[in-house]
Image (spheres, grey):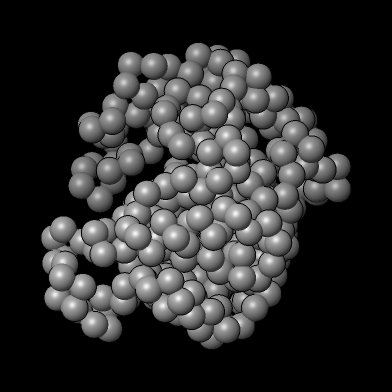
Amino acid sequence: MKEILQSPLNYTGGKFKLLPQILPHFPKEIDTFVDLFCGGGNVGCNITCRRVIFNDIDTRVIQLLQLFKENDRQVIVDSIATTINEYGLSWAYKNGYNYYNCDSNNGLGDFNKAPFNKLRESFNRNKTFDFQYFIQFYVLILFAFNNQIRFNAKGEFNLPVGKRDFNVTMQRKLNRFIERLHQINCTFANQDFRNFDIKNLTLQDFVYCDPPYLVTCATYNEQGMWTLCAEQDLLHKLDNLNNRGIRFALSNVLSSKGKTNCILKKWIETNPDYTCIHLDYNYSNASYQTKDRISGSDEILVINY
């Protein structure tokens, strides 16, 4: 089994932490693996198969993943460094925190706020969507609050500056992720899941779905991007896969903080072909059988094989 790598994109709902629990439930033999809601690519980059299709509705994220796949790693790293230097952002691993009148506890936000805002303004004005656009996009992610991705209704990146910069950990993640993408046979698609064509999938293929969660609050739900109708459409698509004998796995949350996804619960209960596996989001700190004590979330994996 390949070493489990973490995506350099801190995508909300990313499955890196749960991969040791999820991957053992996946089929051993897979021809084409479809990562239907790939986000940062944490799952697809860790699958052993003939081909991976990374699909996501977020055009910028898909094109950033393509940039990692199609360009030389050193060229990407050098371009990131050039952008950091151009805007006067920090390099704490080179110069130390004292150089920026900051300390590791409070972070680098005070120093980076002005140059970060300047970069963010430049990025939001840039409509060329070229190589440099996506380098700026990634540098914004590196220096943004919690390294997250968020755009407002106007399509503008609107996260504030964070506490960290392009530190050794982030450099290692990026380097290893780019190397992995170069090693695997993968393609990229930018489709709404409803429009993703499944008619050519075979019994040897496998579809993994990690959609936004209906009963949780997250960045991707702030603008109503995931609705009850979307949930129903996805479950219907999975039923169609099952009717054709195509294997799938669905990650979701059955309940969270007193809210229950009733449509998902009923769908599982009325389909005897489906198996619901309860996961432990805090698996490293608690027994496998214990549900998340902090958030009260019941993380599940639903499979049809």
Q: Quadrant of the C terminus?
A: top right
Residue displayed at 14% across by 67% down: 103
Query: Residue 155 falls in which quadrant of the image?
Result: top right
Write down the quadrant of residue 70 in the picture. bottom right
Question: Can residue 269 be seen by looking at this rendering?
Answer: no
Task: Give x and y (percent) for residue 182.
Answer: 62, 76
Q: Residue at x 36, y 71 (%)?
A: 89
- The spot of residue 261 in percent (x, y) is 48, 18
Answer yes or no: is residue 119 visible: yes
- Residue 107 lies, with reference to residue 185, above or below; the image says above
- Give the left or right position of residue 10, taking residue 130 as reference: left
Q: Is residue 153 above or below residue 112?
A: above
Q: Where does the image place residue 304, in percent across and percent down from the top left?
A: 62, 35
93 shown above or below 121: below
Q: Give the residue displayed 27% in from the left and 43% down from the top.
A: 282
* Residue 85 horizontal side relative to residue 210, left or right: left
Image point (55%, 46%), residue name: 156
Viewer-side residue, 222 vs 27: 222
